[in-house]
Structure formats: C-alpha cells, structure tokens
Amino acid sequence: MTRTAEAAAVRPGEVRDTEPMTGDAHEQRPALADEGLTVGRVAALAGVSVKALHHWDAIGLVRPSGRTWAGYRVYSGDDVARIHRVLVYRELGLPLAEVGRILDDPGADARDHLRRQRSQLVERISRLEKMVHAVDRMMEASKPGIRLTPEEQIEIFGTDWRPAWVEEAEERWGDSAQWAQYAERAAGMTPEDWKEVAAATHALHADLATAMRAGVVPGSVEANALAERHRASISRYFDCTHSMHACIGRMYAGDPAYVQSFDAIAPGLAVWLRDVIFANSESHGVDPESATWE
C-alpha cells in the first residue's frame, strides 16, 4: 500500500483530521507521534465510551492534539491527563460546560472548587450512611422469625434460653422448606403468642420428665401419646412427619447442646425422649435408624 493510500484509509475508533497532508510525510510527523494513543485505546484505558470521547472532541472539551505521519489524530499524554480531570469533575456532578470552563479558565481556582465539592461529598456520604443504617433497621425489623429482643426472649423462654439459637438454627436449616414454613408462621406471632408457646413447651417437658421418672416404657400407649404431643408441638412451626420426628430424636441424643438442655430438666431425658420418638415412629412404619428428612 502506498503512503498516500494508507493515509486515506480510516481506521475504526480513530479521529481523523479532515485536512489533507501537504509536503513530505516525514516533515509533517510530530516528534511524539509514536507515543500517541488512538481514541479506542484511550477509551479502554480511561473507562469511557468512544462515543463520549467523540462528543468531548466535538464540543472542544478534550481534543486529540497529536498526529501520526499518516494524518491520524491521536491523544498525547497531556490529553489523557485532561480526560482524567474531566472524569473527576464529572463524578462530582458538574455539567460538561462548567468542567470545560474550569479547565480552560486560568483565573478559575480549581483547588477552591474541589474543596467545596469535597465538602458536599462528605455531606452526601453522611446522608447515605444514615440511609444505610435506616435500611438495616428496617431489614432487622422485618426479619422472619422471633421478633423479640434478647431480653424479651429470655423473659419468655427462661434463663436457659440463648438468643443466638435462632441465628444458629437459620444457619443450619435456613435453605430448607421447613425453615421457610417456620419463618412464615413465626412472622405473624406476637409476644403473647410466644408466651403461650413457651408455657406449652414447659408443660410438655415437665410431663415428659414425670413420665420418665415414673418408668413409662417407650412404645407404650402413654409413651406414644407423649411422642405425638411432642411432634404436634414441632408442627406448630413446620409440618413434621414421623420420619422427620425420628431425625429430630436422633439429634436430641447426639447433639451435646440438646443433651445438656434436656438433661438439665431431668438427667437422661434426652436419650429417653429419643427412644420414645423412635418407638412411636416405628409404629407408623418408619425405621428410625435410617429415617431421612422428608
């Protein structure tokens, strides 16, 4: 390709001067032409669109000042620095016309202007932080589950209750359909509702301990009735099948935290309750040892 033909070919993404070259091409070549950047390259480096750069060129905000020997206009290092200054001012919300005035007016105090903009940004950040805190409080207030303060939870469920249990349970079962059921049902419960639940639970635990001390045998009619009563108490939160109930019984006797909680009511209660649940599950056709969460 001849030098004249090469000069006539317009490369995509480059700003081309419309004036033809005159004289020898080497004489027209700027000293730093090899260091110039095309519009496409500058757009990629600065994170702006080629369209934006063309617009800034058209309005005189940032014009490529370099030129290749073939006549293509390219951006110099100073041009790129000006682009970054434009981006800073634009991020501050200034109109492009005002940006151009600040950059081109030798009498404009850029530092004073930036100082005022910084003050405004600090105020905006403060407002946004307050909004974030407000949203956090709204999210916490609308969080499914027990909507009680830790003090209210302890008052209702007793001094042995740990408020962290709710978060731990959500981490453990939060993705399950049963947790979704619990969240939906618990979301509409009032503190008075929770007091009723706590009273019923305490009464059930007391009856379980009394039956164990009296020597009630797992699998007996009385034991099976207590097992069904226990399963019904869990079904207040989600639909608990006999297979699920067997899994829960297995957890009661295998998790140290549950063992400690039940044995604080009556020594050996955790294992006895597991056996009662297992026997009742078997009477409903479930193998407790291989039962699954379904």
Image: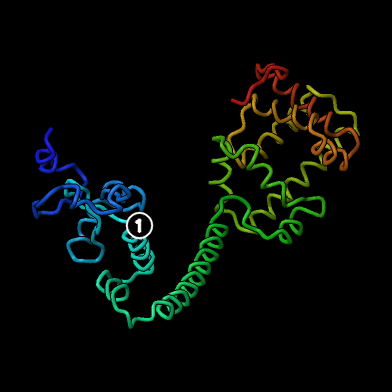
Give how far across and how far down residue 133 sits, in percent: 55, 65
Foreground of the two, 150 or 218: 150
Give how far across and how far down residue 137 sits, in percent: 56, 63
Q: Note whether 288 is above or below 76 in the view shown.
A: above
Identify the image quadrant of residue 280.
top right
* Residue drawn at point x = 13 percent, y = 48 percent: 24
* Residue drawn at point x = 57 percent, y = 58 percent: 140
Is 267 on the left-hand or right-hand side of 169?
right
Q: Quadrant of the C terminus?
A: top right
- How many residues crowd mark 1 within 10 Å: few (<14), some (14–19), many (20+)? some
* Residue drawn at point x = 62 percent, y = 26 percent: 293
Find numbered disc 1 in the image and state the secondary structure of the residue it sits on.
helix
Give how far across and how far down residue 226 sits, in percent: 75, 33
Residue picked out by circle 1? 77
Give how far across and how far down residue 200 sits, in percent: 72, 47
Identify the image quadrant of residue 95.
bottom left
The kind of residue on which mark 1 rests is Gly
Foreground of the two, 266 or 168: 168
Is 47 on the left-hand or right-hand side of 218?
left
Is 50 on the left-hand or right-hand side of 132?
left
Foreground of the two, 257 or 242: 257
Figure label count:
1
* Residue drawn at point x = 30 percent, y = 51 percent: 36
